[in-house]
Image: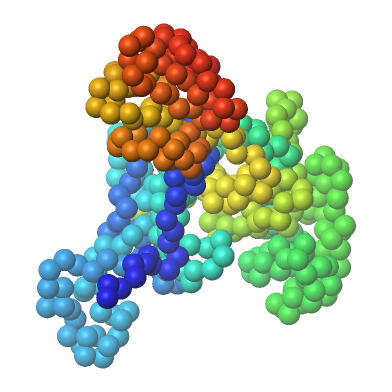
Amino acid sequence: MAKKPSIPKGTRDFNPEEVAKRNYIISIIRQNFERFGFQPIETPSFENSETLMGKYGEEGDRLIFKILNSGDFLSKADPEAYEAKDSTKITPSISEKALRYDLTVPFARYVVQHQNDIEFPFKRYQIQPVWRADRPQKGRFREFFQCDADVVGSQSLWQEVEFVQLYDAVFTALKLEGVTIKINNRKILAGIAEVIGAQDKLIDFTVALDKLDKIGEEKVKEEILGKGIPESGIDKLQPLFTLSGSFESQIAQLKSILSTSEEGKKGIEELEFIDKAISELKLQSANLQLDVTLARGLNYYTGAILEVSAPKGVDMGSIGGGGRYDDLTGIFGLKDVSGVGISFGLDRIYLVLETLNLFPETITNTVKALFINFGEAEAMASMKAIIELRKNGINAELYPDSKKTVRQFNYANKRNIPNVVLVGASELESDTYTLKNMDTGDQQSVDLGTLVRLLKEK
């Protein structure tokens, strides 16, 4: 008995409806990327191992899918490592390539490799799958798409302003109104750490602060104390726990808290610039909110930090994020190339749109009309009409077999095809077509020109 087929854990099949919905989201993201001047690039699914390894930290390296060398790869394996069964030492001798872990490092490699052909500042977008050897769980997959946009070669804060507008434009186009674009600045966090005497514990401090919404003020204080930050520093942090109000009022409070930190004051200036620009330019449906606890990507972000959360009432993690990095290409030897970028969380956006019932009903109706097959002569006449419909941008098809009419109608219903066209003996004789609406049951006899017009209007 044949073994039941399956797919690897952490991967997914997508049915036609799911693909149509995902393509709907991707098409809107792509349209707006291009509207904002970003150019598409694509990089290989796999890179040389040396390109990826060592760029994501020890944990990230473990999650990179390695590709075995082709041919008799074991013949070139390190004998001692093979004998000792030491996988970390044997891997470099049997695997020279790996599946990409994200789009950022391959992009950095691309910029450095093609720097003489690129016009800086370079605005690129990329929508491609990535792979991570993670433990599969709800909402976490081993294969998934990333939708990234970055600008490299400019330190201008107008780039951050544009990315806020880009988020707003995409989510407005998706009818996902009321998302919150949270913003912070690494210099603010560094300034706070300086004020409380924890410069050398910046990561520990911000990791704890980032949990404020989840574990509350007292638990955060306990965790900070546990990291060796003095009680006097905790007292200086107190105003942060009650920081609230408008963007402008929070900035005013931060100016008081960070009055002794030059780096902190620089972060405030950058946030003020972005806020004033957005206040004057206006957003369509999103809200820009200052969140001093936001600390994602602190290891590589050097300026603005962005994160997008779904509208109130939707229990979902971030649906987008990004920030400013000052030396992305430095890992490949091209120093001092500043960049800023954002990413859209395709899978989470999908779940939010599904939860809020925001997908247009017409998304899955890819075929507007099914022609019923009554026999060879009728099928030929139907195919001639179908050619004309397709020339006019109307998706149509012929049922391939001249089986019972009821079976063909059931097929149209199961495929959610909204119209059927009947070309039988009487239609052949009168050179007409009977168009039937599958929802209402209404039908009418029309000529080819009218058939084209009616289906275009539907």
Query: Relative to residue 181, is residue 404 drawn left or right?
Result: left
Quadrant in which residue 169 is drawn: top right
Q: Is residue 164 above or below residue 138?
A: above
Q: Name the residue located 81 percent from the left edge and 50 percent from the top edge.
A: 254
The one nearer the camera, 12 or 401, is 401
Where is residue 114? Give x, y as percent.
30, 40
Q: Does residue 391 appear anywhere in the picture?
A: no
Q: Name the residue located 33 percent from the left edge and 30 percent from the top edge.
A: 373
The one nearer the camera, 220 or 362, is 362
Q: Is residue 96 above or below residue 114?
A: below
Quadrant where the N terminus lies?
bottom left
Q: Name the residue located 44 percent from the left edge and 49 percent from the top edge.
A: 15
Where is residue 136? Give x, y as percent.
49, 69
Where is residue 433? Give x, y as percent.
41, 16
Q: Name the residue located 21 percent from the left edge and 73 percent from the top edge.
A: 94
Specify the farthest residue to the front. Answer: 426
The one nearer the camera, 415 or 111, is 415
Query: Relative to residue 190, is residue 427 drawn left or right?
Result: left
Specify the farthest residue to the bottom. Answer: 84
